[in-house]
Image (cartoon, grey):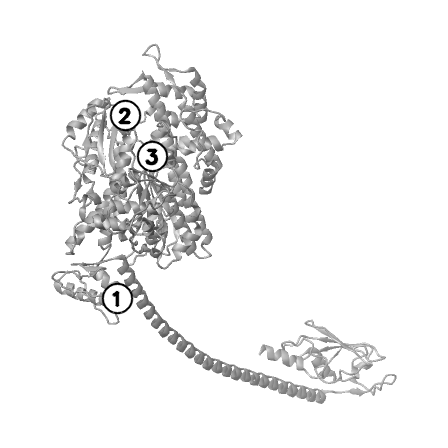
C-alpha cells in the first residue's frame, strides 16, 4: 500500500521519544554511519556506497526524506522510499517497529521484525479468514499471511500451475520458527474453510495432525541457546500436500543435520533439548519413580534447569504424540530411554593405577550406571564393559583383541552412546510423523513447501556444527542471489531491455571455499577422515593453510595458540576451532555399543538397532566412509533442486537486538543483517524491475480473449521472424486494449521491446509489474464473466426449449397410451361377455336336451300329489325301487318329489357353474323357501340335503364339476350368478 510522501518541515525533531529503545552511536537523523565489513575476495559488481555520506548526489533527497520522521511508519512498501539507501530503509523499519508494525514489504521480500513478545490478535483465525477471503490481499497491511495467500493462490497458477516454496531465513532468534508455525496454522485453517461439510471431519483430522507434528519436533529438536530461547537445532522442509481442490490432504517432513552433540555437551548458558526439561517438570510422581528421576535430581546434562520457558510444556507434547498415534505405552518406552541418557551423563570414570587395566568407575557413579542399565534393559556388566574396553580385530584371521580405553576415550564412548540413541529416537519420531500425516501420492498433485533452517550462528567457540549451519545459510543466500538478484538482471539484458545493472554481493566465492572442488574445507575434511589415522589439530591446520592459502574468504590468526581458521561469510566472519572437527565428521559408532543395544530387552531399542544402518569401515579402512559433511551436502543439494523447481517466496526475519528484549531496536545489529541479506539491492531491483515474465505464446493464449476481436496465435515452436512478428502484434493489441489511456511506443521487432512504466516487451517474453499483472487478470476475469454470461444465456435457452419439447412429447405419449389402454379394456370386456354368453347358451341347450330325453325315456312313473306341510305331496318316482333304495337321477328336474321318501340317497352328476346353483336348477327350488334347507360343502364330492317339514331329508352325493370355481358359493343376495361373473371377469 503506497503512502503519501511526507511533508517537508523546517526543522527536524526526534520522532519517537517513548517508543522502542534506540541503541546506537548518535540519535539524530544522520548522527551515525555504518560501513559493512567487506569479505576478502568477495565479488561485488560496480559497488557504489549505499550510505548518503559517501554519495553527495543523494544528500538533498535524503535530507528532504528525513525532515518529517513522524510519517516514516506509513511506508508499507520500501520500494516507495525515495531515495533507497541503508539510512532510509533503517529509519523506516525503526519507525514501524516503534508503531508496533512488524511486517514491511521490500519488493519481492517480506521483512519481519521480531517483537520478542506474544501478539495473539495479530494471528487470530479471524485475521486469517480476512486475508484469505480478500479479493486483493496486497491492499491490506503487510503481513506474513499475504505471502502465504499469494503462494496458495499461485498453486493453481495464473499462467500454469507450479509448486510453491516459502523460504524463511534470518539469524538465530529472528523468529523463523514462529513464522513457520504461523504459516502452517494459516494453511490448515484455509484448507479447512474450502472443504465441504462432508469432508470437514477428515480435513480437521489432517489439519490437527499436521499441526500436532510441530510441538513434537520442537520438543525433540529445539533447545535454548544464548541467542534464542527456542532455537531449532535441526533444519526441516515441510511439504504441505494439496489436492486438485486445494484442500490439505497431508504433509511430509524432511530433516537436516540434527545437532545430536547437544545431548552430551552444552555450551555455558545454554540448555539441552526441551524434551528433557519437560520430563523433569511435567512427569508424575509414579513416572518419576519408574524413570528413576528424583524431583530434586541434578543431572550434569541438564544445565540451567531452574529456568522456566514457555516450551517446557510436557502435557502438550504428550497429547500431540497421542493424537498422532504414539500410544502411552510407546511414549513410556521413549521417555524411559531418555531418562536413561540422563543417568548415563552422570557416569564418570577415573584413571586406573595400571594403564593395562580398564578405567575405574567412580563410586558416586555406580548407582547412575545401574539405573541407566536398568532403564535401557541391558546387563550393567555389559554396559560398563562396552564403555571401558575397545575391541580390535587384527590380522587376516580377524583375531579379536580387547584393549582398555583411556579416561578420555571412555567419556567419548559414553557420549557417543547417548548421541546415537537420541539420534535414532529422533529419526524414528520423524518417520512416524511422516507415516501418520503423509498422504498417498495419488491423492495430491501440488505442494507448498515451508523451509525452516538454523539461523546464521557465531559463538565464542564454533566447530563442525556451526560450519554446517552457516554453510546451509550460504546456500540459501546464494539461491536468493542466483534466482532473483543475478538471474533476473541477466535475463533483462538477454531480452534487450534497457536496464542499468544494480550491484549486489555475490557469495559464490565463500561457497567454493567450503564445498567447491578440491582443495576445499569439506574435501580436506573428508580426506582426513579417509586416512584413518589419529587426527592432530595442529597438523590439520597446517594442511588447511597450505592448501587454501590462495583461496579468498579464508584467513588464519598467527598469534592464536588454538588451531582454527576464519571464514568470511555473507553475514560476517566466523572462526572455527579445528580440535575435534575430524572426529565429529567421522561420526563412527563403536560396534560394541551397537551390539549391547541390540541385546536390549526394551522393544523400542531392539527395533531401532535391529539393522545396522551405519556405514562402518573395517580396521584397514577398506569400506567407504560416509562423513557428516558428505551426507549434509548431499541433502542440501537435494533441497536446492526442489527449491529450483518451485516458485520461491522470501521472508527475511530480522532480530532487533541480541538480548531478546521486547520492543528494543538496536541500529548496529539491524543494519548488519540488512547488509548481509541484501535488502537494499532487493528493493532497488524490485522498484525498477519487472518480477513477472511471461513468454509470448503463453501471454497470447491466456490474455488474448480480453480483446473483442479474434487473435490468431501462431506458435509452432520454430521461433521464426514471422511468428515473432505475429505474436508481438497480438501482445501489443492486448496491452493497448488494457491500457487505452497510456502511451505505448510502437512495437519494434528489431529492438524487441515495448516501452511503458509497467510493461516491457523483450525478444521472447513480456515483462510486467505486479500492478499490470493484476490489471490483466481483472480484464481477463471480466472477459470470462461476459462470455460465461453469454454461454449461460444460450444454455438456459437450450434447456428451456428442450424442456418444452419434452413436455409436448410427453403429452402426446400419454394421450396415445391412454387411448390404447381404453381400447384394450373394451376388447377384454367384449371377449369376456361373448364367452359368458356362449357358455350360458350352451348350458341351457344341454339342460333342455337332457330333460327332454329323460322325460321321453321314463316308464312306470307314479304320480303322488304332495301338499303343503301336513298334507301328502305328489311325487314322481321310479316304482321298481323300494323305499329306502338309492335312486340315480341324471340331471333332470325332480322338484320336491323325492321329499316323500324318508331317506333317499341320490347320486347326482352336477353340471353347471357352481354346485349349489346346479343343484337348485336340477331340483327347481327357490332360494327364498323357508320350509326346507339345502346344504352342500366345498369338497370334491359333496352332499346336498333338502329338508322339507315334516319329512326326513334327502341326501344327494355330488361329483366334482369340471368347470372352474364350481365349488365356490356365489353371492346369496340375488338369485343370479353375479359372483361367478365377477370371478370370471377377473381371470379372463
Structural distance between the alpha carbons of marks 2 and 3: 18 Å
- The local secondary structure at tag 3 comes to loop
Residue 445 seen in render: no
Q: How busy is the neighbourhood of tag 2: few (under 14 within 10 Å), some, or many (20 plus)? A: few
- The local secondary structure at tag 2 comes to loop
Q: How busy is the neighbourhood of tag 3: few (under 14 within 10 Å), some, or many (20 plus)? A: many
| Label placed on residue 580 | 2
Image x and y of residue 145, in percent: 37, 51
Residue placed under numbered mark 1 in the picture: 738
Q: Nearer the viewer, residue 285 or 810?
A: 285
Looking at the picture, does residue 304 appear above or below residue 795? above
Residue found farthest to the right: 870
- Sequence-first disc among 2 and 3: 3
Image x and y of residue 52, in percent: 21, 45
Residue placed under numbered mark 3 in the picture: 258
| Label placed on residue 749 | none
Residue 162 seen in render: yes
- Sequence-first disc among 1 and 2: 2
Looking at the figure, which quarter contains the C terminus? Answer: bottom right
Q: Is residue 488 left or right of residue 412?
A: left
- Sequence-first disc among 1 and 3: 3
Amino acid at each position: 500500500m503506497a503512502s503519501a510522501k511526507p511533508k517537508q518541515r523546517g526543522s527536524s525533531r526526534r520522532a519517537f521519544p517513548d517508543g522502542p529503545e534506540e541503541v546506537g552511536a548518535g540519535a539524530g537523523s544522520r548522527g551515525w554511519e555504518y560501513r559493512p565489513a567487506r569479505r576478502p575476495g568477495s565479488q561485488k559488481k560496480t559497488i557504489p556506497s549505499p550510505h548518503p555520506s559517501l554519495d553527495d548526489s543523494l544528500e538533498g533527497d535524503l535530507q528532504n526524506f528525513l525532515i518529517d520522521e513522524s510519517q516514516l511508519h506509513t511506508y508499507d512498501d520500501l520500494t516507495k522510499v525515495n531515495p533507497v539507501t541503508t539510512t532510509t530503509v533503517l529509519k523506516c523499519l525503526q519507525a514501524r517497529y516503534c508503531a508496533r508494525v512488524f511486517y514491511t514489504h521490500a519488493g519481492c521480500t517480506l521483512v519481519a521484525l521480531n517483537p520478542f513478545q506474544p501478539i495473539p490478535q495479530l494471528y487470530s483465525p479471524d485475521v486469517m479468514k480476512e486475508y484469505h477471503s480478500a479479493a486483493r490481499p496486497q491492499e491490506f497491511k503487510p503481513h506474513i499471511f499475504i505471502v502465504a495467500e499469494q503462494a496458495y493462490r499461485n498453486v493453481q497458477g495464473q499462467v500454469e500451475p507450479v509448486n510453491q516454496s516459502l523460504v524463511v531465513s534470518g539469524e538465530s532468534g529472528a523468529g523463523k520458527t514462529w513464522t513457520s508455525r504461523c504459516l502452517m496454522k494459516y494453511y490448515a485453517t484455509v484448507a479447512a474453510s474450502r472443504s465441504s461439510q462432508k469432508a470437514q471431519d477428515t480435513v480437521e483430522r489432517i489439519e490437527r495432525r499436521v499441526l500436532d507434528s510441530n510441538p513434537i519436533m520442537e520438543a525433540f529438536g529445539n533447545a535454548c541457546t544464548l541467542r534464542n530461547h527456542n532455537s531449532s537445532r535441526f533444519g526441516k522442509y515441510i511439504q504441505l500436500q494439496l489436492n486438485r481442490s486445494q484442500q490439505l490432504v497431508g504433509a511430509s517432513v524432511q530433516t537436516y543435520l540434527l545437532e545430536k552433540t547437544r545431548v552430551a555437551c552444552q555450551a555455558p548458558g545454554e540448555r539441552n533439548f526441551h524434551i528433557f526439561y519437560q520430563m523433569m517438570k511435567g512427569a508424575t510422581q509414579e513416572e518419576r519413580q519408574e524413570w528413576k528421576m528424583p524431583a530434586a535430581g541434578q543431572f550434569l546434562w541438564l544445565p540451567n534447569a531452574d529456568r522456566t520457558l514457555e516450551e517446557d510444556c510436557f502435557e502438550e507434547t504428550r497429547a500431540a504424540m497421542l493424537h498422532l498415534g504414539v500410544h502411552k505405552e510407546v511414549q513410556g518406552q521413549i521417555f524411559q530411554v531418555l531418562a536413561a541418557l540422563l543417568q548415563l551423563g552422570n557416569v564418570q570414570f577415573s584413571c586406573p593405577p595400571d594403564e593395562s587395566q580398564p578405567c575405574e568407575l567412580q563410586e558416586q557413579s555406580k548407582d547412575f550406571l545401574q539405573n541407566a542399565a536398568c532403564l535401557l534393559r541391558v546387563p550393567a556388566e555389559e554396559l560398563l564393559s562396552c564403555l571401558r574396553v575397545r575391541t580390535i580385530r587384527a590380522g587376516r584371521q580377524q583375531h579379536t583383541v580387547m584393549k582398555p580405553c583411556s579416561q578420555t576415550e571412555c567419556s567419548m564412548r559414553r557420549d557417543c552412546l547417548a548421541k546415537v540413541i537420541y539420534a535414532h529416537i529422533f529419526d524414528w519420531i520423524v518417520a512416524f510423523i511422516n507415516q501418520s500425516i503423509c498422504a498417498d501420492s495419488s491423492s495430491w498433485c501440488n505442494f507448498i513447501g515451508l523451509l525452516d533452517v538454523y539461523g546464521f550462528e557465531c559463538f565464542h567457540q564454533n566447530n563442525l556444527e556451526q560450519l554446517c549451519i552457516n554453510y546451509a545459510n550460504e546456500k540459501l543466500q546464494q539461491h536468493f542471489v542466483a534466482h532473483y538478484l543475478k538471474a533476473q538482471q541477466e535475463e533483462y539484458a538477454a531480452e534487450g531491455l534497457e536496464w542499468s545493472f544494480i550491484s549486489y554481493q555475490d557469495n559464490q566465492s565463500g561457497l567454493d571455499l567450503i564445498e567447491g572442488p578440491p582443495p576445499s574445507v569439506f574435501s580436506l575434511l573428508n580426506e582426513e577422515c579417509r586416512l584413518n589415522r589419529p587426527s592432530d589439530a595442529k597438523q590439520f591446520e597446517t594442511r588447511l593453510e597450505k592448501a587454501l592459502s590462495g583461496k579468498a574468504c579464508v584467513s588464519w590468526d598467527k598469534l592464536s595458540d588454538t588451531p582454527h581458521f576464519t571464514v568470511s561469510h555473507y553475514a560476517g566472519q566466523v572462526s572455527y576451532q579445528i580440535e575435534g572437527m575430524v572426529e565429529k565428521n567421522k561420526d563412527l559408532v563403536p560396534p560394541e555399543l551397537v551390539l549391547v543395544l541390540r541385546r536390549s530387552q526394551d522393544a523400542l531399542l531392539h527395533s531401532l538397532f535391529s539393522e545396522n544402518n551405519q556405514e562402518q569401515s573395517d580396521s584397514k579402512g577398506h569400506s567407504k566412509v560416509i562423513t557428516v559433511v558428505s551426507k549434509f551436502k548431499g541433502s542440501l543439494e537435494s533441497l536446492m533442486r526442489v527449491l529450483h523447481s518451485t516458485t520461491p517466496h522470501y521472508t527475511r526475519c530480522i532480530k532487533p537486538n541480541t538480548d531478546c528484549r521486547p520492543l528494543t531496536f538496536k541500529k548496529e545489529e539491524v543494519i548488519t543483517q540488512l547488509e548481509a541479506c541484501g535488502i537494499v539491492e532487493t528493493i532497488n531491483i524490485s522498484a525498477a524491475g519487472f518480477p513477472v515474465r511471461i513468454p509470448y505464446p503463453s501471454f497470447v493464449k491466456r490474455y488474448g480473449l480480453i480483446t473483442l476481436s479474434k487473435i490468431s496465435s501462431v506458435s509452432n515452436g520454430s521461433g521464426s521472424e514471422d511468428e515473432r512478428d505475429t505474436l508481438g502484434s497480438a501482445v501489443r493489441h492486448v496491452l493497448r486494449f488494457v491500457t487505452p489511456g497510456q502511451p505505448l511506443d510502437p512495437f519494434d521487432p528489431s529492438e524487441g521491446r515495448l516501452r511503458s512504466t509497467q510493461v516491457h516487451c523483450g525478444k521472447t517474453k513480456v515483462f510486467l509489474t505486479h500492478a499490470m499483472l493484476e490489471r490483466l487478470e481483472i480484464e481477463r476475469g471480466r472477459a470470462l464473466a461476459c462470455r460465461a454470461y453469454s454461454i449461460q444465456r444460450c444454455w438456459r435457452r437450450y434447456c428451456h426449449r428442450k424442456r418444452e419439447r419434452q413436455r409436448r412429447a410427453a403429452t402426446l405419449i400419454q394421450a396415445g397410451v391412454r387411448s390404447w389402454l381404453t381400447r384394450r379394456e373394451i376388447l377384454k370386456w367384449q371377449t369376456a361377455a361373448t364367452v359368458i354368453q356362449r357358455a350360458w347358451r350352451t348350458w341351457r341347450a344341454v339342460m333342455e336336451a337332457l330333460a327332454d330325453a329323460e322325460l321321453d325315456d321314463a316308464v312306470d312313473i307314479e304320480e303322488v300329489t304332495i301338499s303343503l306341510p301336513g298334507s301328502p305331496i305328489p311325487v314322481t318316482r321310479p316304482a321298481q325301487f323300494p323305499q329306502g333304495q338309492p335312486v340315480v337321477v341324471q340331471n333332470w328336474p325332480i322338484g320336491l318329489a323325492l321329499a316323500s321318501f324318508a331317506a333317499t340317497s341320490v347320486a347326482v352328476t352336477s353340471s353347471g357353474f357352481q354346485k349349489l346353483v346346479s343343484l337348485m336348477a336340477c331340483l327347481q327350488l327357490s332360494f327364498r323357501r323357508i320350509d326346507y334347507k339345502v346344504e352342500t360343502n366345498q369338497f370334491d364330492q359333496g352332499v346336498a340335503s333338502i329338508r322339507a317339514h315334516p319329512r326326513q331329508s334327502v341326501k344327494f352325493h355330488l361329483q366334482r364339476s369340471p368347470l372352474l370355481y364350481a365349488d365356490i358359493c356365489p353371492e346369496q343376495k340375488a338369485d343370479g350368478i353375479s359372483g361367478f361373473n365377477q370371478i370370471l371377469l377377473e381371470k379372463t
